[in-house]
Image: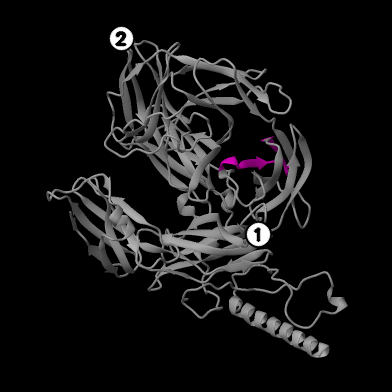
Amino acid sequence: MVNGNRWMALGLVVLAAGTGYVGFRLAVGGSARTHDGSLDIGDRPGPPRSPESGAGTRPRIGPIRVMTEGPRNGRPGEPTDRQSQALAAFDGDVEASPVTGSVTNEDKESVPAARVAVRLMTAGARHSRIGDVVASTLTDAEGRFSLVGFHRLGERYVLDVTHPEYALARTPPVNPLKPSTTRRDVVLVPGVHIAGTITNQEGNPLTGVEVTAYDLDLVSLSPGGRVEGRATTDNQGRYEIEHLRRGTKRVVTRAHGLANGQQSPVRLGASVETLDFRLAAGHHIAGRVIDGDTGMGIGDVVVRAQPVGSAQIPSRGGSPARSATGAGGKSGDTARTAPDGTFRIAGLTRSQHVVSVVRGLGEVGTVNATPGGEDIELRVRLQGTIAGRVVDAATGDPITRFSFTVSRGPRPALVSPAGTRRVADPNGAFAALDVAPGSHHLIVDAPGYARGMAGPVETSLGERVAGVVVRLERAILVHGRVVDAGGSPIAGAGVSIVEELQMAASTTHPGILPQRRMDVHRSGVTTFADGSYLVPNVGKGRFHLTVGDPPRHIVTQTESFTLIGGEGSVEVSEVVLSRAATVTGTVFDEAGRPDYNAVVAAFPAVRVNGDALLSVGTDAQGRYRLEGLRSGTWRIAVTVSRGRMKMKARNGSEGRTVTLESGGRTNVDFRD
């Protein structure tokens, strides 16, 4: 009986191995000339290797093609006869290609001495963020500029163009792997202005009041936000700030002995002449920031006092406003502590405030306080340092150009792009400053390498941890094409590679609760004119692609595929995008008038992976346009009528059911 069970178990093992091999061959789909090197895909099924073959080595199998769902122009596994534009761009020295362009005004006149700054784009979970300046230059007498030497494979950038006589201009993304994006011609416009009068509570004009406009549409790591313009009131209490971008602003006034005035958010669609302020008597909050363990004062840290329940001011210029606490920084007033940890924040209103120490985008040591208090105590912990080197895992040679992020806690995959720091060092050295006590991981990205990690690294109160080594392995290039249902290439489609991570459902009881999948965005690119794309710096792991061309085509998610390491290029089969459907119409109220304050939403009858709730507002004529819908059955409903929520529409008891066809257009009117 024992022997029988043993033979049965052996048979099951052989059957499983055979099944795994067949599955692997189906996934491989044959050979492809686009694979430039060998891929380590693990041990090849079959008889054991002889000792002479090297007991500690794995066989190199290649070339391979990773296949995902979707038809191909040719048979699976057949190589293409012509190199794609994406691969041709990669074969060139993309990091040495300059970014060039010209700067002119609306009259097509050259603008000399305009500053052109290159900003790094960092990929977030939901959207990209604009980061640090990595290069800058001034335009010459003919308004021309050229920037070179900052490129790193896998990064994307935007250009900020500024001049004292014009509003800031920002270009679309620059991608070294798309040569068509490395030429940017910029047109500067004067922009809009804000003006107004500042008085005291009695209505008398105030002279010498500083007025600052912050841009809330641009990401800023400053606690107050990005300063876009300043002005000072004259003897009539008048001020004017010129050359502002259209968009969302926060406008703050500051004067000695008076409470700071603030209006936020202010949405500027056009110039505003009457953004007035009436300032009351000012109050202050004072106190000390101390270390929670030693009681010693901590100097040179930022303290913010933010009013509790501050009212939002309506937007100006007829456009909806965004939250004031978005990309441009939170509202509130700040001060920096003295060497002994003391601080004093003046210009506050009489209302209660939340006082906290600002660290990056977060806040610690938070307490509630009423202006007039002199003994506010904020307890925080001193920060430490983590230092080390980044090296090639195979050779041990230093990697001289990289970016790193410090991730705190047990989930190193979840890192904030705001904390990314760019390094260029001949020895591959780095130092992470201002690291809070606790457990951390070092996440490193470098051109030509897969993302690497070291940790956990334990830091304590004010400790310097040195000697951390991060070893990076060479990366894989993932490339392919995006086409429509007829096989024609789609240019300009967005392609994102997403890693599928298995995360413990509970950090305290990881062995009890099952794991759950978490999708983490790793990199995003766009397709060339021939529909080809290339994603560099991809490492081991399980991935899928999210591909879209809204609103013309439906966003599609490919089947998952696994990369087990190595160096080379892997071609993913063509991704076919379907044409999107569109629903248009007009919303009328009970009196038959166009409802300019309505919201119309589309609900799928059957939810498909990737579907998102789509909703749009009506224009001044009550018209709406829902785009980017896949074919199938949808319920179209008015969820907000005359500015009031309609719960029946949201729970499914109201609306119109329509069947949409790929690329079709359907009209649905609503009469209350």
Q: Residue at x 26, y 44 (%)?
A: 643
Q: Residues within 10 Å of mark 2 (few under 14, many from 20)?
A: few
Q: Eyeballing the image, is 162 above or below 530?
A: above
* Element class at badge 2: loop
* Mark closer to the observer (2, 1): 2
Q: Quadrant of residue 656?
A: bottom left
Residue 8 visible from this viewpoint: yes
Query: Image quadrant of residue 132?
Result: top right
Instruction: Give the labeled residue for mark 2.
Output: 204
Q: Position of residue 388 (x, y in %)?
A: 75, 42
Residue 585 vertical position relative to residue 213 in the rendered view, above or below: below
Q: Is residue 85 left or right of residue 541?
A: left
Q: In the drawing, does residue 543 fall left or right of residue 280?
A: right
Q: Is residue 420 magenta?
A: yes
Q: The disc labelled 2 sits on which kind of residue? A: Asn
Instruction: Please tell me which residue lies in front, 656 or 222.
Output: 656
Q: Residue furthest right?
A: 51
Q: Residues within 10 Å of mark 1 (few under 14, many from 20)?
A: many
Q: Is residue 388 visible?
A: no
Identity, as a three-letter code, of the amino acid under mark 1: Ala
**Residue at which label 1 appears:** 475
Q: Is residue 504 above or below residue 218?
A: below
Image quadrant where one finds the C terminus: bottom left
Q: Quadrant of the N terminus?
A: bottom right
Where residue 439 appears, as percent x and y from the top left, is 71, 44
From the viewer's side, name the closer residue of 478 and 35.
Answer: 478
Identify the residue at horizontal 46%, vertical 62% (top origin): 547
Q: Give me the disc on residue 595.
A: none
Closest to the observer: 330 or 55? 330
